[in-house]
């Protein structure tokens, strides 16, 4: 299996710093806490909260499985088509009831596994933001809550990478799933899908950096083997988002990144959010 370090940084133009390197097989395990001088303040997961971080080495995409261990209700965030069998196997092995298969936004670098997972696992529904313009069983809007068992995620609007990006926040567990809005020491590109650097900057500072500094942030991608960061780390160490707005906009407008290789195939498929697999 190829290492995550072989993926091209140019896909989303993320700026990364040195950090802990891992092999792809290790990503099946619970993520370690990020390197931080304030480790003791991080919020531990409750005993009834299940968390798995899984990785697709081709697109360098993270998929997240969350569940209530008492009710067995589960959700899956940002599944990848080529990893559907893996994801379905984990759900079955853990005897979970998959309630929602959801995306942080309409991806351009891979095809979502949503539709195929719905065919493989009875009862689960697709979910995405209404602002994404993609089809799904359920559309969510800012401020709404997504419940699984006793746990819930808050939907926060974080447009800028695309017009329909959202961040899912689990306040009790002290975590947020940022999609491509915030990457580890970077951020998503803003030059397609109605992206806008000023909008992204505003979204991140108001909706993500406003969270408690000890909240852990889990991105949709990483290209250097990093798994998790914190609000505090990105507020102080992110080489783009710590800049003043004007500098950030200038940086983003001059990245000159190549056209995403899979965008012409991925966007039409992801606009249907996998529902076309049922027709």
Image (tube, rainbow, N blue to C red):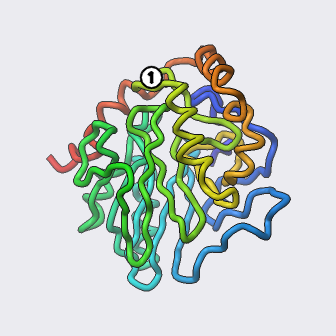
Q: Is residue 126 above or below residue 267?
A: below
Q: Quadrant of residue 120?
A: bottom left
The residue pinned by badge 1 equals 192
Report the front residue among 261 and 44. Answer: 44
Report the front residue among 147 and 73. Answer: 147
Q: Residue furthest bottom?
A: 70
User: Residue sitting at 49 percent across and 32 percent down?
Assistant: 161
Q: Could you tell me residue 222's position as x and y percent? A: 63, 43
Report the front residue among 2 and 144. Answer: 144
Q: Residue furthest right?
A: 37
Q: Residues within 10 Å of mark 1 (few under 14, many from 20)?
A: some
Report if residue 30 is visible in the image. yes
Say whether residue 25 is left or right of residue 38: left
Q: Is residue 160 above or below residue 235?
A: above
Q: Could you tell me residue 135's position as x and y percent? A: 24, 43
Q: Secondary structure at mark 1?
A: loop
Q: Quadrant of residue 111?
A: top left
User: Residue sitting at 53 percent across and 32 percent down?
Assistant: 200
User: Residue sitting at 80 percent across and 56 percent down?
Assistant: 35
Q: Is residue 4 above or below residue 70?
A: above
Report the front residue among 2 and 180. Answer: 180
Report if residue 60 is visible in the image. no
Q: Is residue 92 above or below residue 101?
A: below
Q: Could you tell me residue 102's position as x and y percent? A: 37, 54
Q: Could you tell me residue 275's position as x and y percent? A: 22, 47
User: Residue sitting at 55 percent across and 27 percent down?
Assistant: 189
Picture mark count? 1
């Amino acid at each position: 299996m190829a290492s995550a370090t072989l993926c091209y940084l140019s896909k989303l133009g993320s700026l990364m710093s040195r950090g802990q390197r891992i092999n792809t097989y290790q990503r099946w395990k619970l993520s370690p806490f990020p390197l931080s001088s304030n480790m003791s303040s991080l919020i531990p997961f409750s005993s009834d909260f299940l968390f798995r971080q899984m990785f697709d080495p081709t697109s360098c995409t993270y998929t997240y499985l969350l569940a209530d261990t008492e009710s067995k209700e589960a959700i899956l965030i940002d599944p990848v088509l080529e990893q559907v069998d893996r994801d379905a196997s984990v759900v079955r092995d853990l005897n979970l009831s998959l309630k929602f298969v959801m995306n942080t936004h309409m991806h351009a670098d891979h095809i979502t596994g949503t539709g195929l997972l719905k065919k493989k696992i009875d009862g689960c529904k697709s979910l995405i933001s209404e602002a994404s313009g993609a089809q799904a069983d359920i559309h969510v809007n800012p401020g709404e809550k997504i419940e699984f068992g006793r746990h819930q995620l808050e939907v926060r609007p974080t447009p800028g990478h695309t017009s329909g990006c959202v961040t899912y926040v689990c306040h009790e567990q002290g975590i947020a799933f940022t999609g491509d809005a915030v990457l580890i020491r970077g951020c998503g590109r803003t030059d397609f899908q109605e992206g806008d650097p000023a909008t992204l900057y505003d979204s991140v500072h108001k909706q993500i950096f406003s969270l408690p500094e000890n909240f852990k942030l889990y991105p949709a991608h990483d290209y250097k083997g990093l798994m998790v960061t914190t609000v505090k780390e990105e507020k102080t160490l992110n080489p783009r988002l710590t800049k003043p707005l004007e500098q950030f906009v200038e940086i983003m407008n001059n990245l000159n990144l190549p056209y995403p290789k899979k965008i012409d195939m991925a966007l039409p498929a992801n606009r249907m959010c996998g529902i076309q697999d049922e027709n």
